[in-house]
């Protein structure tokens, strides 16, 4: 349920969260999808290390067709 809720929040709506985090931090994004917010994390925070985590489970939706 939480994952679904987070996916509904657009990158624009998550930007205030990034402004509260320290620059050059170590951080993670869970549920990267296409990486749009990952790019915002990189450009805004310039993290020392960024862990990008996606669920490891096969999706049949056509959105994921080219990911293999």
Image: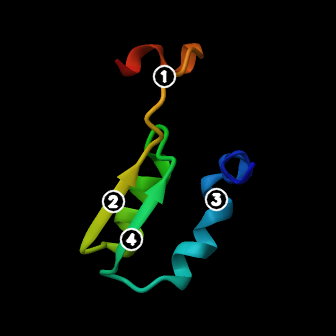
Tell which circle, 3 or 1, labels the residue nearer the N-terminal end: 3
Local crowd size for mark 2, using a 10 Å CA cut-off: few (<14), some (14–19), many (≥20):
few
Q: Which mark is residue 51?
A: 2
Local crowd size for mark 1, using a 10 Å CA cut-off: few (<14), some (14–19), many (≥20):
few
Farthest residue to the front: give it.
57
* Badge 2 vs badge 1, beta-carbon distance below 8 Å: no
Q: Residue at x 42, y 86 (%)?
A: 22
Secondary structure beneath label 3: helix
Tell which circle, 3 or 4, labels the residue nearer the N-terminal end: 3
Q: Position of residue 52 (x, y in %)?
A: 37, 53
Secondary structure beneath label 4: strand
Q: Residue at x 48, y 29 (%)?
A: 57
Question: In 3D space, how far apart are the residues under numbered discs 4 and 2 (Cα atoms)?
Answer: 6 Å
In the picture of the structure, the residue carrying the numbered disc 3 is 12
Secondary structure beneath label 1: loop
Q: Quadrant of residue 40?
A: bottom left
Count numbered badges in the picture: 4
* Badge 2 vs badge 3, beta-carbon distance below 8 Å: no
Secondary structure beneath label 2: strand
Q: Which mark is residue 58?
A: 1
Mark 4 or 1: the one toward you: 1
Tell which circle, 2 or 1, labels the residue nearer the N-terminal end: 2
* Badge 4 vs badge 2, beta-carbon distance below 8 Å: yes
Mark 2 or 1: the one toward you: 1
Question: In 3D space, how far apart are the residues under numbered discs 4 and 1 (Cα atoms)?
Answer: 26 Å
Q: Quadrant of residue 2?
A: bottom right
Horizontal side, residue 51 vs residue 35: left or right? left
Vertical comparison of 18 with 53: above or below: below
In the picture of the structure, the residue carrying the numbered disc 4 is 27
Q: Position of residue 44 (x, y in %)?
A: 41, 71
Horizontal side, residue 64 vs residue 53: left or right? right
Local crowd size for mark 3, using a 10 Å CA cut-off: few (<14), some (14–19), many (≥20):
few
């Amino acid at each position: 349920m939480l994952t679904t809720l987070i996916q509904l929040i657009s990158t624009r709506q998550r930007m205030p969260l990034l402004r509260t985090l320290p620059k050059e931090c170590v951080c993670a994004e869970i549920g990267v999808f296409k990486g749009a917010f990952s790019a915002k994390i990189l450009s805004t925070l310039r993290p020392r290390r960024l862990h990008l985590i996606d669920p490891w489970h096969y999706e049949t939706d056509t959105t994921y067709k080219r990911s293999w």
